Amino acid sequence: MEISIGLIIIKTSSKIYEGNWLNGKFDGYGKLSIIDNPEPLLEWGNFGNSRFIYTGNFKNGLFDGEGTLHENYIIYKGNFKKGKKHGFFTAEQWTLGGLIEDRWELEFQNDNLISKTQTKMI
């Protein structure tokens, strides 16, 4: 059993992973970025050219447990199971200028949206 921690850059798939891994797979807490998009999607933050960023728990190479996923101007915070959104989430949609456009409470089961409620903006 090989337990490691560190930074790995996978050039063939444009992935950057920083965190723990076990037996060659992401495992434990870490941050995974996909950087193959040539244009910055989220210029308001420090996401650079990332297509998406996941920060949270991994198990056997997949998102598993509590985490935050930045994807297509939307930030999802909640639980993942075997690489899929599963359970209750909050989600915020951002503009390029860094303003929140919408906020929702979501429920997923195996990456399928079950319910969506828009919450009031403060």
Image (cartoon, rainbow, N blue to C red):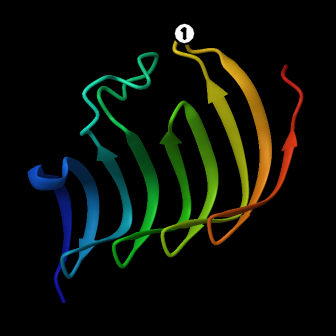
Q: Amino acid at mark 1?
A: Gly
Given residues 97 and 31, the one toward you in this image is 97
Horizontal relation, residue 67 to residue 37: left or right: right
Q: Name which residue lies at 40% across and 70% down.
A: 62
Tell me residue 96's x, y (percent).
52, 15
Residue 111 lies left or right of residue 106; in this view the side is left
Q: Quadrant of residue 4?
A: bottom left
- Looking at the picture, how far across and down is residue 106, in whole percent? 77, 52
Quadrant (top left/top right/bottom left/bottom right) for the C terminus: top right
**Depth check: 31 or 107 in front?**
107
Asked whether, in this view, residue 49 is left or right of residue 68, the answer is: left
Q: Which residue appears farthest toward the top when viewing the image? A: 97
Which residue does the image show at 64% across and 14% down from the upper left?
Answer: 99
Q: Is 107 drawn above or below residue 45 in the view shown?
A: below
Question: Which residue sits at x=63%, y=48%?
Answer: 77
Return the residue at label 1: 97
Q: Is residue 84 above or below residue 74?
A: below
In percent of width and height, residue 1 lies at: 19, 90
* Residue 86 shows in this picture: yes
SS type, badge 1: loop
Asked whether residue 8 appears in the rendered view, the answer is no
Q: Residue at x 28, y 58 (%)?
A: 19
| Residue 92 figure quarter | top right
Q: Is residue 52 left or right of residue 117?
A: left
